[in-house]
Image (tube, rainbow, N blue to C red):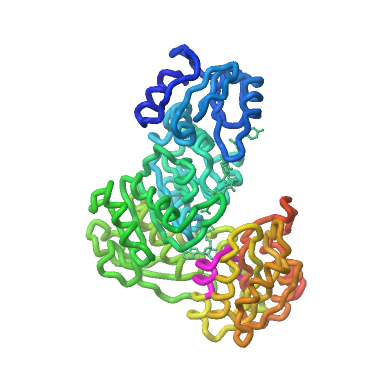
């Protein structure tokens, strides 16, 4: 990466402030990195981060950095390129270093408080029907950058740091991928991980208060603003017409996108581009039909079957249908892809012979718990609903009261247990949830060990029961006092309990 090209790019974005010492304009950096431990010879080191320390720059120089990119002059032995915003500069530098891989991909990005992972999986499955072996995916669970076993690996963040994002995009392109579907967290815009990136399709699923607090968003307005950035940075937009703040999100989309390229969907909504008509829901799947109000989408008018239950998943599926259509998939691909998609830890259902149906679901805040329990309560009103859950420590304290609210509305029994307590006492977290529970409506028990809580719930259930194991999905750890303590996972434990009980 030539320094003069980098400076030109930084100037284009009005980020460049000068250098701390003379830098040969023909300097060609062999490496770029933001982690001193990864630095190698003739590299450009990027100084960024809440916990950044100048000693990292010294270490990077010792490892081969011949210049640095930063917001301040660190007065070290190598020259610095100074910028007004180093996170934006890192994103641009990464694009240049990896030769703008996004230009060789059809890019689909999902934002929303809930449903990003599920919709991303739906879209990946549909597009893989249409374009086998050519669809990359960056989700909270897995990244897929090619077709070899080593090209699928676990994610660290919902949206990766810009450098890692463009690195993986480059690998995906080199592996023959033509389309990328990815999740775009609000944090990604807050921390400029996707700065300078334009999506071919940006989808806004929904928004409800979450991720507000220390190290996240200062308030809801900032959370909404960050999420709206996806609309401002997408060539075509898809928006859920039924969500809160729809008008504001639509207005944001219109700032940069012709209304002809903004598509909406809603339940029984004749004014949306496509209208979703829910059909029969079963304990383990759901079905719906679409009608098109925008004649360009007439081919999407059809019946669809989704292998994961939940009315909210019909909305997620509709978003995926629209996004896949814009990427070139056919209706038959959508029907096949949706019927085959299972999302790890999201509405996974286990049928038993004598102990009801067990759901494993990632619901870990009020919005998701409410959506899940509302669905079960309204669709299966004759069933008894038992929820096994805790709430994470060290963050999201308002989730505790939110859980109680959802239980009061829709649950019969709550078994409070442990879920990533961090540095807090899980019993105290459970007491805080319990404090909001109306005990005339909801029978509540505390069982500290999650494995025992799951056993208790299933063992006491009959075929009249729906048991929801909420919050952990397929997480294989409990975060306790800063340590990821191994945990067998909810599905493994539930399957074992069912096998022990039923043989
Ligand atoms: C508070 C926060 O958002 N932190 C994120 C941020 O950290 P940062 O850039 O401030 O860097 P840092 O971890 O303080 O480290 C400082 C710098 O020193 C460098 N370093 C460090 C040690 C060393 O020896 N040498 C060295 O050079 C590091 O490489 C880094 O550049 O950028 C890092 C990537 O470069 C992220 O890993 C990190 O996410 C933390 C772990 C995190 O948990 N973030 C959450 C809030 C998050 O982003 N969540 C969203 C999902 C939200 C949703 O569900 O919607 C996500 O996208 O996952
Ligand atoms: N459209 C939706 N509306 C409300 N709740 C939903 C919706 N889609 C999924 N959920 C609930 O939210 C949980 C998380 O879903 P998913 O992982 O797809 O969302 P996400 O946006 O990736 O979430 P997170 O940001 O928490 O990782 C699900 O397990 C389900 O309970």
Residue 199 or residue 248, whichever sits in front: 248
Image quadrant in which the C terminus is located: bottom right
Residue 156 or residue 440, whichever sits in front: 440
When asked about the image quadrant of residue 221, the answer is bottom left
Q: Position of residue 452 (x, y in %)?
A: 76, 70
Q: Is residue 477 left or right of residue 218?
A: right
Is residue 172 something one can see in this rendering? no
In the rendered image, the vertical position of residue 118 relative to residue 21, given as above or below = below
When asked about the image quadrant of residue 249, the answer is bottom left
Q: Position of residue 391 (x, y in %)?
A: 64, 65
In magenta, the rendered stretch is 358-373
When asked about the image quadrant of residue 235, the answer is top left
Residue 134 or residue 246, whichever sits in front: 246
In the rendered image, the vertical position of residue 387 relative to residue 98, given as above or below = below
Residue 370 is a magenta residue: yes
Residue, x 31% and y 52% (percent of image)? 253
Q: Position of residue 109 (x, y in %)?
A: 42, 48
Residue, x 44% and y 51% (percent of image)? 129
In the rendered image, the vertical position of residue 458 relative to residue 48, given as above or below = below
Q: Is residue 389 left or right of residue 289?
A: right
Q: Is residue 420 left or right of residue 75?
A: right
Total numbered labels placed on residues in the image: 0
Residue, x 71% and y 81% (percent of image)? 460
Q: Position of residue 146 (x, y in %)?
A: 52, 39
Residue 430 is a magenta residue: no
Is residue 151 something one can see in this rendering? yes
């Amino acid at each position: 990466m030539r320094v003069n090209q980098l400076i030109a790019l930084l100037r284009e974005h009005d980020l460049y402030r000068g250098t701390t010492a003379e830098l040969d304009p023909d300097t060609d950096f062999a490496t770029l990195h933001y982690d001193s431990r990864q630095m190698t010879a003739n590299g450009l080191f990027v100084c960024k981060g809440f916990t950044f320390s100048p000693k990292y720059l010294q270490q990077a120089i010792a490892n081969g950095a011949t210049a640095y990119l930063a917001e301040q002059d660190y007065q070290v032995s190598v020259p610095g390129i100074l910028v007004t915003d180093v996170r934006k500069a890192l994103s641009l530098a990464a694009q240049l270093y990896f030769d703008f891989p996004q230009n060789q991909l059809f890019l689909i990005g999902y934002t929303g408080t809930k449903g990003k992972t599920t919709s991303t999986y739906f879209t990946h499955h549909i597009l893989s029907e249409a374009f086998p072996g050519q669809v990359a995916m960056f989700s909270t669970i897995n990244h897929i950058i090619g077709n070899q076993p080593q090209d699928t690996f676990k994610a660290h963040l919902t949206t990766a740091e810009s450098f890692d994002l463009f690195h993986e995009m480059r690998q995906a392109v080199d592996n023959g991928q033509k389309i990328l579907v990815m999740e775009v967290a609000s944090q990604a815009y807050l921390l400029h991980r996707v700065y300078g990136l334009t999506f071919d399709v940006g989808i806004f699923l929904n928004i409800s208060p979450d991720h507000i607090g220390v190290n996240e968003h200062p308030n809801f307005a900032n959370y909404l603003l960050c999420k709206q950035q996806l609309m401002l940075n997408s060539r075509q937009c898809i928006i859920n017409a039924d969500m809160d703040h729809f008008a504001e999100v639509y207005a944001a989309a219109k700032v940069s996108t012709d209304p002809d390229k903004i598509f909406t969907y809603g339940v029984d909504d004749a004014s949306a581009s496509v209208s979703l008509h829910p059909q029969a829901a079963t304990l383990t799947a759901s079905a719906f039909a679409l009608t098109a109000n925008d004649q360009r989408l007439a081919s999407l008018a059809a019946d669809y079957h989704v292998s994961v239950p939940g009315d909210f998943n019909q909305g997620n599926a509709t978003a995926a249908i629209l996004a896949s259509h814009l990427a070139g998939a056919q209706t038959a691909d959508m029907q096949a892809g949706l019927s085959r998609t299972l999302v790890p830890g999201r509405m996974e259902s286990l049928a038993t012979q004598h102990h009801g149906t067990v759901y494993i679901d990632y619901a870990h805040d009020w919005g998701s718990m409410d959506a899940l329990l509302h669905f079960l309560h309204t669709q299966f009103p004759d069933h008894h609903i038992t929820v096994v859950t805790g709430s994470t420590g060290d963050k999201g304290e308002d989730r505790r009261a939110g859980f109680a609210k959802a239980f009061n509305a829709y649950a019969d029994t709550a078994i409070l247990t442990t879920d990533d307590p961090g540095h807090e006492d899980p019993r105290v977290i459970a007491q805080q949830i319990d404090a909001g529970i109306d005990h005339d409506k909801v029978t509540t028990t505390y069982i500290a060990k999650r494995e025992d809580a799951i056993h208790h719930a299933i063992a006491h259930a009959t075929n009249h029961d729906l048991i929801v194991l909420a919050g952990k999905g397929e997480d294989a750890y409990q975060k306790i006092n800063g340590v990821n303590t191994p945990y067998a996972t909810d599905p493994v434990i539930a399957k074992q309990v069912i096998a022990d009980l039923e043989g």
